[in-house]
Image (spheres, rainbow, N blue to C red):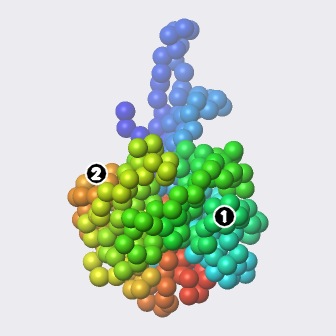
């Protein structure tokens, strides 16, 4: 059975009711990243795919939406950001204040509808982190990971994807195995591999974890193939397209580069260049996020997050 195409399309199915011997209409629909199955007014299944873009994402036709979120209004030193899978919450990592700040979006993944909510977490208080270079949710939303300078802080969330409900779990310092100052970090979807972006390197260093997502069980393995083709430092990286692609960003050349992966969420081999996009009107691009056919870039120099269509 094929799913309906993305958009306001509905597929009607007739399913036999073996108990009553009648037929019940079942409706399957996909709207954006939401798939739902209903029978009359009863919702049988509703599933979100976290705003992930469809496989085959390319950066060859990026267009600026002329939409900017100026984060300097609430903090002058934003270093990272992440959306909730629904796209209705945006969290930013601030350096000098050591805060994670939340914004609410009335339209998912549309920065023009973002409004400041509050500072929801002081990530320095228990972890000792001095900077938040990356923020990543565990796929099920029960934990969040804040990384900076080779340290990964883990927090459990009593409400999925809600950082205001965070409780500190552990902080793991992995600098002993890193070549240089580390920036962003990213887990594979199964939590068994952790990748670091390292200053002056065009590759990622990676660790395996004997207990998924538990950084205290990390063992250093080695480096990935190059994930930038312009000899620039990779400062942040994200898996997209259900792990079939890796997007990287460099703050020295302000390039965003997209790579196809032979194995989902595995950047250790089978990495091939797909496409790239360059920011030409500003400098110091530090973080990237791709979702819902949108590209979001954090421009540190201007203390803003920009929205593009891909």
Residue 79, compared with residue 138, is above or below; it is below
Disc 1 versus disc 2: distance between alpha carbons?
33 Å
Q: What is the x, y in percent for residue 51?
A: 51, 55
Q: Residue at x 72, y 56 (%)?
A: 164
Residue sitting at x 61%, y 67%:
129
- In primary-sequence order, the first of circles 1 and 2 is 1
Residue at 45% x, 82% y is 251
At label 2, counting other C-alpha atoms closer than 10 Å, the crowd grade (few under 14, some 14-19, many 20 or more) is some
Out of 275 and 243, give the one closest to the viewer: 243
User: Is any part of residue 75 visible from this angle?
Assistant: yes
Tell me the crowding category of disc 1: few under 14, some 14 to 19, or many 20 or more residues within 10 angstroms, Cα based: many
Q: Is residue 66 left or right of residue 101?
A: left
Residue at the right extreme, as displayed: 118
Residue of label 2: 263
Which percent across, then down, holds residue 39? 59, 28
Q: Do the residues labelled 1 and 2 touch (CB within 8 Å)?
A: no
Q: Position of residue 181 (x, y in %)?
A: 45, 75
Mark 1, secondary structure of its residue:
loop
Q: Nearer the viewer, mark 1 or mark 2?
A: 1
Question: Where residue 22 is drawn, which disc sits there?
Answer: none
Where is the N terminus found, in terms of image quarters?
Answer: top left
Furthest-bottom residue in this view? 281
Q: Position of residue 98 (x, y in %)?
A: 68, 71
- Point out which mark residue 123 bears: 1
Indicate the quadrant containing the C terminus: top left, top right, bottom left or bottom right: bottom left
At horizontal 41% and vertical 40% (from top left) the residue drawn is: 3
Mark 2, secondary structure of its residue: strand
Residue sitting nearer the eye, 19 or 103: 103
Please say whether residue 249 is visible from this viewpoint.
no
């Amino acid at each position: 059975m094929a799913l309906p195409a993305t958009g306001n399309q509905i597929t009607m199915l007739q399913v036999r009711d073996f108990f009553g011997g009648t037929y019940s209409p079942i409706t399957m629909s996909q709207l954006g990243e939401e798939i739902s199955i209903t029978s009359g007014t009863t919702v049988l299944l509703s599933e979100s795919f976290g705003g992930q873009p469809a496989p085959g994402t390319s950066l060859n036709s990026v267009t600026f939406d002329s939409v900017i979120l100026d984060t300097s209004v609430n903090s002058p030193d934003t270093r990272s950001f992440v959306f909730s899978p629904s796209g209705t919450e945006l969290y930013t990592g601030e350096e000098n204040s050591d805060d994670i700040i939340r914004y609410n979006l009335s339209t998912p993944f549309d920065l023009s509808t973002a409004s400041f909510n509050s500072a929801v977490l002081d990530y320095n208080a228990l972890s000792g982190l001095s900077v938040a270079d990356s923020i990543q949710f565990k796929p099920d939303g029960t934990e969040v990971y804040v990384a900076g300078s080779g340290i990964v802080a883990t927090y459990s969330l009593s409400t999925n994807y809600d950082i205001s409900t965070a409780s500190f779990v552990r902080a793991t310092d992995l600098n002993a195995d890193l070549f240089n100052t580390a920036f962003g970090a990213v887990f594979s979807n199964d939590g068994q591999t952790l990748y670091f972006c390292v200053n002056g390197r065009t590759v990622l260093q990676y660790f395996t974890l004997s207990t998924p997502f538990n950084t205290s069980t990390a063992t250093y393995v080695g480096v990935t193939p190059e994930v930038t083709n312009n000899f620039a430092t990779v400062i942040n990286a994200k898996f997209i397209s259900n792990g079939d692609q890796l997007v990287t960003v460099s703050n020295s050349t302000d390039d965003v580069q997209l790579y196809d992966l032979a194995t989902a969420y595995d950047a250790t081999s089978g990495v091939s260049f797909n496409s790239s996009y360059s920011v030409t009107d500003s400098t110091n691009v530090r973080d990237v996020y791709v979702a819902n056919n949108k590209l979001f870039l954090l421009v540190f120099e201007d203390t803003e997050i920009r929205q593009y269509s891909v």
